[in-house]
Amino acid sequence: MLRSAWKKLDYYSLIRVTVAVLCSFALASCIIFIFSDTPVAAISKLFFGPLTSQRNFFIVIQTMIPLIFTALAINVIFKSGLFSMAADGAFYTGAVIAAFIGIKIQLPNIIHQFVIILVAALVGGIITSIPAIIREKTGANEFVTSMMLNSVFFFMGIYVVNTYLLDKAAGYASVRFNETASLGNLVKGTQIHYGFLIMIAVLIVVYILIEKTKTGYEIKLVGSNKNFAIYSGINVGRTIIVSQLIGGIVAGIGGSVEMIGMYKRFTWNTPVTYVWDGILINLLSSSKPIFIPLAALFISYIRVGADIMSRATHVDNGIVAIIQAVIIFLVSAERFMYRLKKKKEEKQALLTQQSIEGVAN
Amino acid sequence: MDILFKSEFWFAVIRSTTPVLFATLAANLASKSGIINIAIEGTMLIAALVGVVTSAFTNSLLLGLFFGLLSGVLVTLALSYFSLKLKSNILITGIAINLAASGGTVLALYTITGDKSVSTVLKSAVFPTVNIPILRSIPFVGNILSGHNLLTYVALISVGVIYLLLYKTPLGTRIRAVGESEAAAESVGININKTKTIAIVLSGMFSALGGMFLSMGYLSMFTAGMTSGRGFVALATDAMSGSNPIGGLFSSLIYGFSDSLANYLQNTSIPLQFIQTFPYIFIVVAFTVFSYIKKLKNKAEDSI
Amino acid sequence: MANILEVKDLTKVYPGGILANYNINFSIKEGEIHALVGENGSGKTTLMKMLFGIEEITNGEIYYKGKKVAFESSKDAIKLGIGMVHQHFMLVPSLTVAENLTLGIEKKKGVFIDMKSCISAAEDISSKYNLRIDQYKRVRDISVSMKQKLEILKALYRGAELLILDEPTAVLTPQETEELFEQLLNLKKLGHTIIFISHKLDEIKHLCDRLTILKSGKCMGTYDVDELSQEEISKLMVGRDVVLNYNKEDTNPTKNVLEIKNLTYTDKFGIKKLNNISFNLKNSEVLGIAGIEGNGQNEIVSIITGLLDADSGTVIFTDQDITKIDIGKRRKLGISHVPEDRMMHGCAEGLSVSDNLISNVYKQFTNKINLLDFNEINEYSLKLIKKYDIKCSSPKQAIKGLSGGNIQKAIVAREFSVDTEVIIINQPTRGVDVGAMEFINDKILNMRNLGKSILLVSANLTELLGLSDRIIVLNKGKIVGQIKDLKNVTEEELGLYMLGLKKDSEDQLKEA
């Protein structure tokens, strides 16, 4: 599997991504110089902070987990051609469900977690299917409907937490989860939980699903050319819904895993925004599931670096958003560094023609 | 439901509509030229902050307005440059702008004020309210239409102005030509990139006005994330209006109505969060219904 | 006569490394009608796009009226006096004729458009050149020939002295073509120069003074029209004698495999596209459908394949009524289809060659737990690649990297290699290089000889006459003729049917 991944590596793309990343780092450094009294300290914390201690590096790993879940969800959802952001709604609701079942229902260990993740997965699948079904029946664009519905699900989630799960003494947070609603410690001394293993399992399943199965093939075909898929006799509507379901299941699992893996109470009072990171990760990995972990690791790394930086100096970690934005700008610009490729192509075409003529003469 | 008969309610409706109306007009302009401006949300947010900060540091509303507009223009220029000249996917770059805006505004806010969520430390300017002399003496209607913030009237007048621009001027015809058939525009020597850039710069200006209304009219400060998805709502209202500014006014009113309704219902026993979902549900339903009608209409045309 | 236009060593390489024009040299004399001849894919359109400023030049020079010129956009070309009428109309559907005419140079009243002046400008120029148009109608509501007149007027309105017309007669009826020729000769009298791009040799002989021949992106020379015969021109265009006799074994069609009964269909514009069409398709035969584009051929194909529902009528496949059956099931029953627009309906651009080759058989390579057997898929793909001579670097190569001819071969390979009884082929060799064209035609006959039924729709009359066993001609949605004796029919006679000027009797058509 790794060898085929190596072959897929497109050197031109790799150079572009690297240059884009370096540019974004350069810009971020400039901004830090402008905004901070202690720019050098800030910059070193940003870029090297995660490496300064084992604990920091493990934080990178644990931050990576929800990023990978969402990136995988986005990968499958977009693959069928739909531009739906519903993965955030599914993720958040998955977390709410985890809190609800974690607090209100008593179950033995292992079964409790299993039920939580299962229910979150199913509900997540339903949530992401909604914009697709609406699109299928009415033609309404899924970006708009998913964005609106994400807000609706967010408020409903807050309602559930406030009404049923609230710890009145703690202010805004839920009551503690039951003991059994937790993913134990995987690595001692860190917060890395068994969710990491679940993530790996999901990653492998999604990879196999997309690259190796008939369903994955159909999804790719529909996403690549809907007309052709119709012509080939594929049930396009059903295939799209299936892809959304899979994406939603992955996002639901991600949300519930994050909640019971990392938290003892429900404390999220702002909406989740992982879809944007998910889009960036897919951009960096050229939408190939196999490169997603690497891209997610990178994003996670700079996020943690920014956190470390914001705690040590006075530079807000909003700088990460700027770094991400610059990378997106540069990587998605086809013509960025295109001259390199263009000159090579033109030269090649002319050489070929001349050699043909040379042979003819 | 007797608040529907109170003029204060409808006043509030128009007030709530204003930022979304600006955003919708911004979306209309971009869409007519063939561009989907997903970055309206981010642009509004950036302009909201820039207006506040500039007016606070220069003690001038006018300079705040100017730099706010400028920021909107620059942001949208970046968007158009990357998608037109460097051929990036405009949806993706729009998303990047929104990303940069949400993180960047907090970064700037914190650096300037030391506060991560509000700009109350700054003494920023506010656009004045306008009482229209004769209008305000008309019973009921006068209370609804007079006494709004200056920018609200700007928004309402802009509906007419943009309509005239798009349908009665050479520039507008070119924008529509470029949006409908680039090939046709190119065949007569119209500079497509230039026309699209003009449309999108105008779009950026109206996005900026929408953002500045939020922080310098609706409220008198900047709060993190204050656009609350209005930029995305504009995509729905734009689609519903067929990118026609007059239709845009009506579809924006749907949002204004549901938003005000939600505010008024906060005093009732309905749970807060249910109420908070109202604008989004209204828009989703309206958008879905509209799309369905459009689909049926197309089907009817096809099968005659 | 001076040269109004001179082209030296003009070269164009497209992104992706595609060499479209290579070292083109020719010149156009002022006041002549000059033909640019070449097969599809010979580089004609690219050359004209460079002359009009729409495409960037890779190498070479252009001289207009003796001065070297470089175009940044079509605006520069228009300013110099070059005007272009494109093959696919470049008009804005929701704007009126007058608005389209004055687009970009609108008459103004203050800051607003002066519509009255625009309309009178349209009237003036329309009568000056005797090209009748309706200024008030929206472009989406006018006829094809009026659209073309509008396009010509657009160019003239902007002061074009040199007019480039790209395949102008492709969408015109012969009567409209005659009208066009009259107007072009009139323009010539008024001092304009015309470049006439076409591959219809008889029209060129009729209208033009000189011609330049393009083949595979290279210039094969400029000649007086009288110098060469049509055969000689063909030879230079194609490089070898155009083979008119294909290798057709005698076959014995015995049963009706496909029965089409009384199909009618009216499109969304209210035009009756199919008017009670009935015909049969037998085994071991190629049934050709001839007709000017837009006379119902595509509708018949769409109805048979299942993309479109007829308003009334039935489609019967080996005694089974399939009128209501969906596309997927029809494929499974044994109906294959090579679509007209290969990029839109024939392949998935972003996927690999292999992915595209298995789109109708992938279920066979799926095991019980939904997994695809990639070894078998690879083997199958390689087999097809070899058999159909598909030039690619590997089955995993993205199909969009292949040339048009190779993509078409891949589609043909896919459709021909399954268990199929009926193959519907729509414009199999459009935009395909000559080598691939011969290859595909050969494969079509192969399938016929093996007993398959083939429905062939083609605008290439040579191909149609060469491959078909019999031909039915469509005009305005009706079958107006059936031709069985293909050895003795001429293209002219076929043309008469296609124009609706000749019709077979009811009895003659009953046999179809």
Image: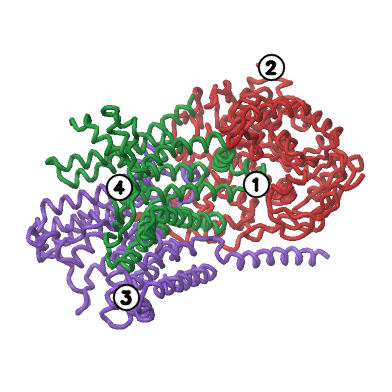
Disc 3 and disc 4 on one polypeptide chain = no
Q: Position of residue B194 (x, y in %)?
A: 59, 50
Rendering colour mode: by chain
Q: Give the CA separation, mark 4 to mark 2.
A: 79 Å
Q: Which mark is residue C443?
A: 1
Report the side of C51 relative to C367 (left or right). right
Q: Which mark is residue A309?
A: 3
Of residue A345 and residue A145, the one placed in the foreground of this image is A145
Which residue type does callout 1 highlight?
A: Lys
- The residue under label 4 is B218
* Mark 2 or mark 1: whose residue is earlier in sequence: 1
The colour of chain A is purple
Which residue type does callout 2 highlight?
A: Ser
| Chain under disc 2 | C
Disc 1 and disc 4 on one polypeptide chain = no
Report the side of B99 relative to C308 (left or right). left
Q: Give the CA separation, mark 1 to mark 4.
A: 72 Å
